[in-house]
Amino acid sequence: MTTPIYYVNDAPHVGHAYCTVNADAVARWHRLKGDETLFLTGTDEHGQKVAEAAEAHGLSPQLWTDQTSQRFQDAWQELEVSNDQFIRTTEPRHYATVQHFLQAIYDNGYIYRDTYRGPYCVSCEDYYTADQLDHGLCPVHGREVTEMEEDNYFFKLSAFEDRLIAWYEANPKGIRPDTKRNEALSFIRGGLRDISITRTSLSWGVPVPWDEKHVFYVWYDALINYLTALGYGTEASTLDTWWPSVHHLIGKEIIRFHCVWWPAMCMAAGIEPPANIIVHGWLLVGGQKLSKSMADNSDAPVRLTDIAPHVLVEDFGVDAIRYHLLRDTPLGTDGEFSYEGIVSRYNADLANNLGNLAQRIATVITSKCEGVAPAPPSGGPLAEEVARHAAAAVEAWDRFAPHEALEQTWKIIAAANAHLETHEPWKGEAGSGEVAKTLGGALEALRIVTVLASPAMPDACGEIQRRIGLVADPEAQLDDLLTWGSGNPGALVEKGDPLFPRRKADSA
């Protein structure tokens, strides 16, 4: 499981967090299933933008990247991201992999030397043709481009047009969703041009092994990070183990690089293209409160890049932010990010539903069952409803739809709350069988909720499990954990403070 590696010309922001938390939740889900899982993220540290950012801050490129890369690592640690590796493209192992990989492409006859003339966008680190520009501006950033003329090495992308189309046809689910697959395929069918892969006007990059005057252009260096993590080209390579099961999660703005250039580069080097690429949309800033609470307290319109993850965590807590990022914007579509939206989702789903259910169950078990967890009934309507929604949640997690998985999980919470409202165990006689059966069923539903929601909210789910007397079993199988009646009757149940105290809509 991979994220894109993030560019270190600036600090981590909530757009980075959206992608990383989604990838983390999926990785956690597969570990929960018992799948052997390797989760990779990191930072992209070469190129003109980085060199310019370092100069603007009066630092060397290496010192600037050291500082900024650490900010990403700190942000992911604060958001409970469980990556197994964090790769930096300035690492010696990455230099060795890039040179080995591109030397293979060069030796296979797919790299040649020529002169590049045309528009170049520093922000994109990308070349354009005149007809690709938007009224003379970069089509992505809306900024002026630079006319470049430079001695470069080129990759023969045009030689892979037919092979890429054949690969797309043979792998109809290799790129998801279908709209993004069709977008990439349309780009290929529109005709591919060879692309520059080196620079001579820049020294901050991986040196070209066959020509020391050149360094590799940042995108080619960056894409190869996925192979660096697997030890490609070394005796310790795990490429054969992991590459057939690789899943790239990327933003829609880098479809061309990952869904056209990268598969062709892999073909040219003699390895298979990545098996699965999942494309997510953009978070769009909305709401009136955001600029005052999340950014710099100025009156200027706030951009998504102004919103630091640590500010959100300080305000709402880790689990609430992770839940919001996963629940409110389905992978593949654009979504609105606003302060009001976070507060609304927090109060409705976390305070009123999950938090209230956990508090209510613990309180009534304390008063009616002497704080001892009762056993659930062997079946019944609640058990059937829980099983139905749990199966749907499992299916959604498996197909990279965390928002649907959480929606189904919250239907279990709604069913458990309705079950309590119907039977009103707080009105029953303490110690009675009917009260115990009602509370045992609600408690079992809550336990299953904590299993299904744990990839999204590991801390909150772990705390609920602790309060209801569950002891984590690392050997437990997911099917067993989701089987009705697999709880721990007889355990002591603890009330504790509310997990998610309600928030006022205007709090900051």
Image: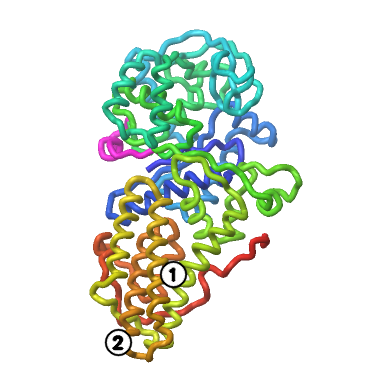
Q: Quadrant of residue 134?
A: top right
Residue 225 is a magenta residue: no
Left or right placement of residue 217 versus residue 492 in this view: right
Q: Residue at x 42, y 39 (%)?
A: 249
The percent coordinates of residue 448 (x first, y second) are: 34, 66
Callout 2 secondary element: helix
Q: Quadrant of residue 170?
A: top left
Q: Residue at x 52, y 73 (%)?
A: 498
Q: Work out whether residue 403 can be spotted.
A: yes
Q: Which residue is mark 1?
A: 463
Q: Taking 188 as reference, is 393 above or below it? A: below
Quarter that holds the C terminus: bottom right
Q: Which residue is mark 2?
A: 433
Q: Taking 140 as reference, is 459 above or below it? A: below
Name which residue type carries label 2.
Answer: Gly
* Spatial separation of the CA atoms under disc 1 and disc 2: 28 Å
